[in-house]
């Protein structure tokens, strides 16, 4: 048996109004001149006004600075520009505020603020000491990616035009604030799509064949919370309990996928870079096909997932337990408006080869519940196209 490290180190501050504790925590962390990294959509929201209310007006006493230009599915330039501002403003910390896009850009900006010429495309080949990064406070405003508790940052690189997962323990946040009041304005469509991302993280990490019973327990409880809270948050955006449970469940999904993910994420990543789909939507459109693919090769894989969804599967055969669980997930997503074929979302059949190529190079499928070939990826795309 090989040696394994189990680590759950992130401090999470949870509850409505938690954002108001931010100044005290910045003091505690020694952050006096933070750079706020966010996206243009958020700047218009009440959530952003709540942040500025606790930080005080920017540009006035120049205690904090703003980079507000992060793209959805962030690109290398977002990271470079934020890093430059962090350096030039003499920033001593980053507050990443937003969905996964803003969080990932904020996390990675700390790398290039330290080493401006570092080639992100060679992140894993070129040795570097990242122990001197400025501290990060992560404040998610979507309940989906779990990036706030993760050690990775997903950035589309210029050289390859593909999503690269930059993974390093020093990318972890020193504090995460989970404040459900910041998510109440998230529109139903994005609430559903980001929630489906969290659900996919929990399902794929639970079924990923790595020995990590702590993550498995967290993934199952995450599924239970999502099944209960996501439909409520979708229909009643101001339901603070549902919003809060979704924020915690998304963070649990992020913790659980320390184990790793699976084939659905490999299918989803190229759909964002080549098809422009939102990451959560891309997962939602591929999840059922991915589950059927895995269940056909490993019957019974989803029995405990079904149990976490509230299904009584005690007397069922393995195949029956999988079938009922997959049907439940399919109906659950459809009720959230997450259905349809890829071509209804703008993906073209002539993109099939390029999608397959990128999915094959994506690392997630290598930790899938069952082995995946290039032909399997192509067949899965064809099934959902
Ligand atoms: N690092 C990780 O571990 C990890 C995991 C999964 C996904 N990701 C990445 O995260 C990104 C997707 O993140 P996302 O799904 O959170 O979407 P997003 O960050 O791209 O945000 C989507 C939209 O929602 C808006 N928005 C966010 N919060 C809002 C709020 N409270 N009210 C109103 N509008 C709001 C934003 O302005 C944006 O237009 C992708 O790039 C994906 O690859 C990273
Ligand atoms: Zn995801």
Image (tube, rainbow, N blue to C red):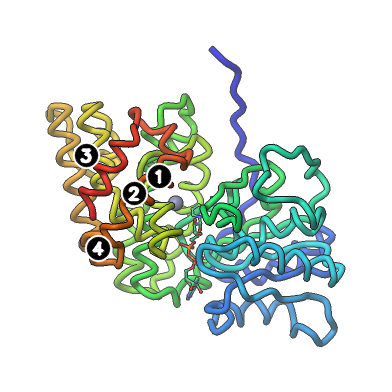
- Disc 1 on helix, strand or loop? helix
Of the two numbered discs 3 and 1 in the rendering, the one whose residue sits closer to the viewer: 1
> Which residue carries the number 3 mark?
292
In the image: residue 163, left or right of residue 290: right
First along the sequence among labels 3 and 4 = 3
Q: CA distance from mark 2 to mark 3?
A: 22 Å
Q: Residues within 10 Å of mark 3 (few under 14, many from 20)?
A: some
Residue 273: percent from left, percent from top:
45, 59
- Dot placed on the residue nearer the N-terminal end, 3 or 1: 3
Can the viewer see residue 8? yes
The image's mark for residue 353 is 2
Q: Nearer the viewer, mark 2 or mark 3?
A: 2
Against 125, is 32 above or below? below
Tell me the distance, in whole angstroms, between the alpha carbons under discs 4 and 1. 18 Å
Left or right: where 46 falls relative to 53: left
Contact? badges 2 and 1 (CB < 8 Å): yes
| Residue 68 placement, left or right of 163 | right
Q: Earlier in the sequence, mark 4 or mark 2?
A: 4
Instruction: Tell me which residue sits at (19%, 35%) in the image.
Output: 322
Look at discs 3 and 4 and give the one toward the viewer.
Answer: 4
Instruction: Give the residue displayed 21% in from the left and 27% down from the top.
Output: 299
Q: Position of residue 241 (x, y in %)?
A: 42, 64
Crowding at dot 2, Cα within 10 Å, few <14 / some 14-19 / many 20+, comes out as few
x and y, in percent, of residue 27 in the image: 82, 63
> For the point 84% across and 60% down, which residue is it?
30
Q: Is residue 242 visible?
A: no
Answer few, some or many: residues within 10 Å of disc 4's Cα (few below 14, many 20 plus, some between 14 and 19).
few
Badge 4 or badge 1: first in the primary sequence: 4
Neighbor class of circle 1 (other Cα within 10 Å; few <14, some 14-19, many 20+) is some
**Circle 4 sits on which residue?**
343
Residue at numbered disc 1: 357
């Amino acid at each position: 048996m090989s040696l394994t490290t189990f680590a759950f180190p992130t401090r999470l501050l949870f509850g409505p109004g938690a954002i108001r504790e931010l100044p005290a925590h910045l003091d505690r962390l020694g952050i006096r001149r933070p750079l706020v990294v966010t996206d243009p959509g958020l700047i218009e929201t009440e959530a952003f006004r709540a942040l500025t209310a606790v930080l005080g007006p920017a540009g006035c006493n120049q205690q904090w600075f703003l980079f507000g230009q992060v793209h959805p599915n962030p690109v290398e330039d977002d990271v470079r520009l934020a890093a430059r501002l962090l350096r030039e403003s003499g920033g001593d910390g980053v507050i990443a505020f937003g969905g996964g896009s803003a969080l990932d850009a904020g996390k990675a900006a700390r790398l290039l603020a330290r080493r401006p010429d570092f080639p992100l495309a060679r992140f894993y080949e070129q040795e570097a000491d990242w122990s001197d990064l400025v501290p990060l406070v992560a404040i998610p405003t979507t309940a989906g990616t779990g990036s706030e508790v993760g050690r990775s940052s997903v950035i589309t690189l210029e050289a390859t035009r593909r999503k690269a997962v930059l993974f390093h323990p020093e990318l972890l946040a020193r504090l995460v604030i989970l404040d459900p009041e910041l998510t109440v304005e998230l529109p139903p469509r994005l609430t559903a799509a980001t929630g489906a991302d969290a659900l996919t993280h929990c399902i794929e990490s639970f079924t990923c064949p790595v020995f990590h019973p702590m993550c498995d327990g967290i993934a199952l409880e995450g599924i239970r919370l999502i099944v209960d809270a996501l439909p409520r948050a979708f229909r009643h955006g101001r339901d603070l309990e549902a919003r809060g449970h979704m924020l915690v469940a998304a963070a649990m999904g992020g913790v659980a996928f320390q184990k790793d993910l699976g084939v659905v994420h490999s299918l989803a990543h190229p759909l964002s870079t080549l098809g422009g789909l939102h990451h959560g939507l891309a997962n939602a459109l591929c999840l059922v096909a991915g589950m059927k693919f895995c269940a056909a090769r490993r019957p019974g894989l989803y029995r405990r997932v079904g149990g976490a969804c509230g299904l009584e599967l005690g007397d069922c055969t393995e195949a029956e337990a999988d079938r009922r669980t997959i049907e439940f997930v399919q109906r659950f997503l459809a009720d959230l408006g997450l259905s349809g074929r890829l071509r209804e979302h703008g993906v073209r059949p002539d993109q099939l080869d390029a999608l397959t190529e990128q999915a094959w190079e994506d690392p997630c499928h290598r930790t899938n519940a069952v082995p995946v070939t290039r032909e399997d990826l192509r067949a899965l795309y064809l099934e959902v196209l």
